[in-house]
């Protein structure tokens, strides 16, 4: 959001002592601070993580991810992945336990996502998918990893799912799109233009659309009839997919349970097929 640093400056005098420390840190570390998780920012400023979260609310944001996204937007358009990497690792010594840091960030992402997804909204997504004639998944670049996982299991149990991954073949895949179809769009910062274009197109054609993304400000958000927001923050140039993958697993599991008899029969038939072709290794 343009002017966010002016907002910090103007609000500074009215802030509490701990909130002033956060504001000062953000103002003094404009290129690195926007890529810090709430816990890492709290650690650097020497305040509690809850204080960082309250700070975002005091400024009028919906939470720390909302504040962080606005901070990032001022500089992210001119940052490459290499530059983001420099800004997220510059202050950290090599020997520190990176595995613990990343796992901690993932736990935070899972907790945040749990609070962001309403059960009724999730159940509505499951109902849409259960009733769909065809399910298309649109996912490019790193998001394709989550898309492939969804496609594999949804097609295994429903036999109607297709992942659209190759940009050149989009028009052929979606030629006969209809209101009876569901298109799932997956995209996380940095968002690919093609994902946004495809979701805009299929929505204009009347298809039922579901967006799985990382923020209310995501350019994909407006093109979903339903949205599932998953936190992907991690102190690196990559996104954390722990939460998106968990949501994908929840979708697969919920669909399986909603179609229990049909899925059970399908899996029994598959087991016979797998045994016939000796698909899996014997392990005792």
Image (cartoon, grey):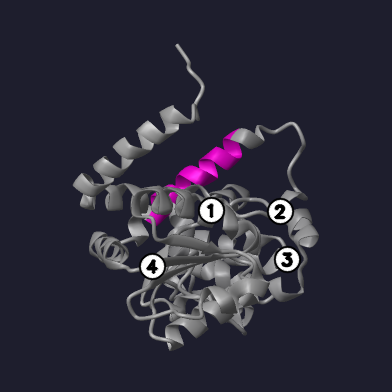
| Mark earlier in primary sequence (2, 3) | 3
**Start and end of the magenta stretch?**
100-113
- In the rendered structure, the answer to whether residue 40 lies left or right of residue 58 reads right
**Residue 148, numbered circle:** 1
Where, quadrant-wise, is the N terminus in this rendering?
bottom right
Q: Foreground: 81 or 196?
A: 196
Marks 2,1: beta carbons within 8 A:
no
Write down the residue under mark 3: 31
Label 1 neighbour load within 10 Å: few <14, some 14-19, many 20+ = some
Write down the residue under mark 4: 134
Where, quadrant-wise, is the C terminus in this rendering?
top left
**Residue 88, numbered circle:** 2
Q: Residue at x 46, y 48 (%)?
A: 108
Marks 4,2: beta carbons within 8 A:
no
**Residue 61, numbered circle:** none
Residue 23 spot, x, y in % from top left: 58, 67
| Mark earlier in primary sequence (3, 1) | 3
Q: Residue at x 44, y 88 (%)?
A: 204
């Amino acid at each position: 959001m343009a002017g966010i640093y002016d907002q910090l400056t103007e609000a500074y005098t009215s802030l509490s002592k701990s909130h002033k420390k956060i504001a000062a840190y953000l103002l003094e570390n404009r290129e690195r601070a926007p890529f810090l998780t709430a816990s890492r920012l709290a650690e650097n400023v020497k305040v509690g993580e809850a204080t960082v979260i309250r700070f975002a609310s005091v400024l009028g944001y919906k939470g720390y991810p909302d504040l962080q996204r606005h901070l990032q937007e001022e500089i992210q358009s001119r940052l490459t992945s290499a530059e983001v990497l420099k800004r997220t690792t510059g202050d950290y010594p090599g020997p520190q336990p990176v595995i613990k840091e990343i796992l901690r960030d993932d736990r935070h992402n899972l907790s945040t996502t749990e609070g962001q997804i309403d059960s009724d909204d999730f159940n509505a997504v499951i109902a849409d998918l259960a009733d769909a004639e065809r399910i298309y998944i649109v996912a490019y670049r790193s998001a394709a990893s989550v898309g492939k996982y969804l496609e594999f299991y949804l097609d295994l149990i429903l036999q109607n799912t297709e992942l659209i991954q190759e940009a050149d073949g989009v028009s052929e895949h979606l030629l006969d799109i209809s209101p009876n179809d569901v298109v799932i769009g997956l995209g996380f910062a940095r968002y690919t233009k093609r994902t946004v274009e495809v979701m805009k197109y299929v929505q204009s054609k009347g298809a039922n659309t579901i967006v799985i993304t990382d923020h209310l400000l995501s350019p994909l958000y407006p093109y979903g009839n339903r949205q599932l927001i998953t936190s992907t923050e991690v102190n690196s140039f990559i996104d954390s997919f722990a939460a998106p993958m968990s949501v994908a697993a929840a979708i697969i599991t919920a669909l399986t349970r909603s179609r229990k008899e049909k899925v059970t029969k399908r899996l029994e038939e598959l087991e016979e097929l797998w045994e016939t072709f000796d698909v899996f290794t014997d392990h005792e």
